[in-house]
Image: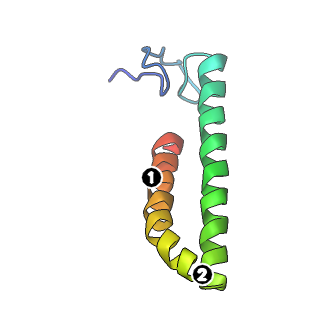
């Protein structure tokens, strides 16, 4: 079974022993780290808003929560996909 880089899809060489490669190069690994960090930042922002609106209910919070909750789920799904 041929394995590919998670970022660019380039075929990876299978090492004779040791840990299997996940990325073809350092730039691909760094790109993945940046994407994960960006998603974690977005998740923290959305989670903070959700906590604020649930701690102090208001009309605006009631309007925003149906938007924020699915957004949080999408971000969590993306993170799960990237972190594998």
- Mark 2 surroundings within 10 Å by alpha-carbon count, few (fewer than 14), some (14 through 19), many (20 or more): few
Q: Is residue 52 above or below residue 40?
A: below
Task: Determine whether, in the image, residue 37 is placed left or right of residue 78.
Answer: right
Q: Which residue is mark 1?
A: 77
Query: Mark 2 to mark 1: distance in Å?
Result: 22 Å
Residue 64, position in %: x, y?
51, 69
Rendering quarter of residue 52: bottom right
Task: Determine whether, in the image, residue 41 is placed left or right of residue 1.
Answer: right
Q: Which residue is mark 2?
A: 54
Rendering quarter of residue 17: top right
Task: Determine whether, in the image, residue 8 is placed left or right of residue 37.
Answer: left
Residue 37, position in %: x, y?
67, 42
Q: Residue at x 66, y 19 (%)?
A: 26
Q: Residue at x 60, y 61 (%)?
A: 46
Q: Is residue 70 above or below residue 55?
A: above
Residue 27, position in %: x, y?
64, 18
Q: Residue at x 59, y 83 (%)?
A: 58
Q: Is residue 75 above or below residue 3?
A: below
Which residue occupies the foreground of this view, 43 or 30? Answer: 43
Task: Determine whether, in the image, residue 64 is placed left or right of residue 55.
Answer: left
Which residue occupies the foreground of this view, 20 or 82? Answer: 82
Q: Is residue 18 above or below residue 76?
A: above
Which residue occupies the foreground of this view, 71 or 75? Answer: 71
Q: How is the image coloured?
A: rainbow
Labels 2, 1: front one: 2
- Mark 1 surroundings within 10 Å by alpha-carbon count, few (fewer than 14), some (14 through 19), many (20 or more): few
Q: Quadrant of the N terminus?
A: top left
Residue 54, position in %: x, y?
60, 81
Does dot 1 land on a helix, a strand or a loop?
helix
Rendering quarter of residue 48: bottom right
Which residue occupies the foreground of this view, 38 or 10? Answer: 38
Checking the image for residue 49, the label placed there is: none
């Amino acid at each position: 079974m041929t394995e590919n880089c998670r970022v660019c899809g380039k075929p990876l060489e299978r090492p004779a022993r040791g840990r299997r490669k996940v990325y073809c190069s350092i730039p691909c690994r760094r790109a993945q780290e940046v994407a994960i960090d960006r998603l974690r930042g977005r998740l923290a922002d959305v989670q903070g808003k959700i906590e604020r609106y649930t701690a102090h209910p208001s009309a605006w919070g009631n309007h925003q929560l149906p938007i924020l909750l699915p957004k949080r789920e999408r971000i969590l799904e993306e993170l799960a996909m990237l972190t594998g």
